[in-house]
């Protein structure tokens, strides 16, 4: 779990780096925004797999409930969060990322397991497609 915080001046747009140790990956499983004013901050991830790089306005629905991204967001090297204060007063930004830390070896093993069973997956998908998914 990592917490990121910033105080944003009126109209300020800031990039917050997410630095992952070399040869490792963060697989983000849960996102929780902190105690902030709703509908004043735009947010997006950059350089992160599994996330479409588009701004979202952090509204009440995101402040009151943790978000579990699907698919999980994967960050390696240096990912970024871009936050923008759309208000005309200073605002606080706070986010907590829950993640699983993987390394190259574990990722390779997971890939091997998936590839070893890919024929089973293909057969299952083909059988479902042939029967209309039933």
Image (cartoon, grey):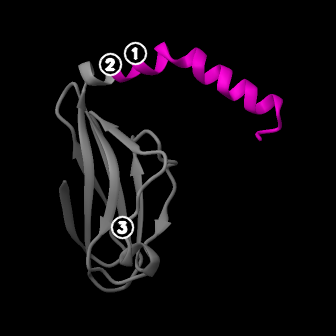
Q: Secondary structure at mark 2?
A: helix
**How busy is the neighbourhood of tag 3: few (under 14 within 10 Å), some, or many (20 plus)?**
some
Q: Nearer the viewer, residue 41 or 90?
A: 41
**Callout in the foreground (1, 3):** 1
Q: Quadrant of residue 14?
A: bottom left
Tags 1 and 3 touching, CB below 8 Å? no
Quadrant of the drawing holding the N terminus: bottom left
> What residue is shown with label 3?
66
Q: Which residue occupies the foreground of this view, 62 or 91? A: 62
* Residue assigned mark 2: 109
* Range of residues picked out in magenta: 108-134
> Mark 1–mark 2 contact, CB under 8 Å?
yes
For disc 2, the neighbor class at 10 Å (few under 14, some 14 to 19, many from 20) is: few
Q: Quadrant of residue 2?
A: bottom left
Q: Quadrant of the C terminus?
A: top right
The residue that mark 1 highlights is: 112
């Amino acid at each position: 779990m990592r917490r990121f915080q910033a105080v944003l001046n009126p109209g300020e747009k800031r990039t917050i780096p997410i630095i992952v140790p070399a040869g490792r990956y963060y697989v983000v499983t849960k996102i929780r925004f902190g105690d902030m004013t709703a509908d004043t901050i735009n947010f997006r991830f950059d350089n992160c797999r599994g996330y479409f790089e588009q701004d979202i306005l952090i509204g009440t629905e995101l402040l009151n409930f943790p978000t579990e991204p699907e698919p999980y967001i994967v960050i390696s090297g240096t990912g970024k969060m871009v936050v923008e204060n759309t208000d005309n007063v200073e605002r606080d930004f706070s986010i907590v990322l829950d993640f699983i830390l993987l390394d190259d070896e574990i990722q390779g093993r997971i890939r091997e397991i998936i590839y070893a069973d890919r024929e089973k997956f293909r057969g299952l998908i083909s059988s479902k497609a042939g029967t209309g998914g039933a």
